[in-house]
Every structure is written in structure tokens, then in C-alpha cells.
Amino acid sequence: MTGYPLEKIYEEVAFIAYHFHWNHENVLNMEHSERRKWCDEISKINQKLNQTSQNLE
């Protein structure tokens, strides 16, 4: 049985904690699917911000 790669867990936790300033322990305790969902949502926010910023240039 193979688990989720530890490196990916660190990436997800760092990504969420950095963008939302959430506690490392709280993010780490989330189910994998919930962490992935938050990563996806943060990515959507970043894409919208990047598009808006490019349109202003």
C-alpha cells in the first residue's frame, strides 16, 4: 500500500498556510481531499489576481 507522498503534503500545507496564514497543525490535520480543495481554491484566486493585474498594465 502506497501513501500520499510526504513531499506533496509539505507543499500543500506550506501553500495553504502561506496564503491563508492558517496554523500549520490545523492544515496538516485536514483530510487530504480537503487540503487539495483549498489548494485549488487558492490557485483560482491567484489566477484571477494575476489576470486582473495583467489587464491593468
Image: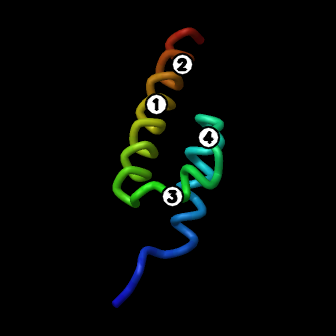
Counting from the top left corner in percent of width and height, residue 45 is at 46, 28
Q: How far apart are marks 1 and 4 (CA)?
A: 21 Å
Q: Is mark 1 on a helix, strand or loop?
A: helix
At a point 56% along the width and 17% down the height, the residue shown is: 53
At a point 53% along the width and 25% down the height, the residue shown is: 50
Q: Distance between the residues labelled 4 and 3?
A: 12 Å
Marked residue nearer the N-terminal end (3 or 1): 3
Mark 4: which amino acid?
Trp
Marked residue nearer the N-terminal end (2 or 3): 3
Q: Distance between the residues labelled 3 and 1?
A: 27 Å
Q: In which quarter of the image is the C terminus?
A: top right
- 21 left or right, relative to 39: right
Please name the residue that numbered disc 1 is placed on. Answer: 47
| Mark in front: 2 vs 1 | 1
At a point 43% along the width and 43% down the height, the residue shown is: 38
The colour scheme applied to this rendered structure is rainbow
Q: How far apart are marks 2 and 1 (CA)?
A: 11 Å
Marked residue nearer the N-terminal end (4 or 2): 4
Q: Quadrant of residue 33?
A: bottom left
Counting from the top left corner in percent of width and height, residue 32 is at 40, 60
Residue at the limit of the structure toward the bottom, as seen here: 1
Q: Residue 29 carries which label?
A: 3
Counting from the top left corner in percent of width and height, residue 36 is at 40, 52
Marked residue nearer the N-terminal end (4 or 3): 4
Counting from the top left corner in percent of width and height, residue 5 is at 49, 75
Q: What element carries label 3?
A: loop
Please name the residue that numbered disc 2 is placed on. Answer: 54
**Mark 4 vs 3: CB contact within 8 A:** no
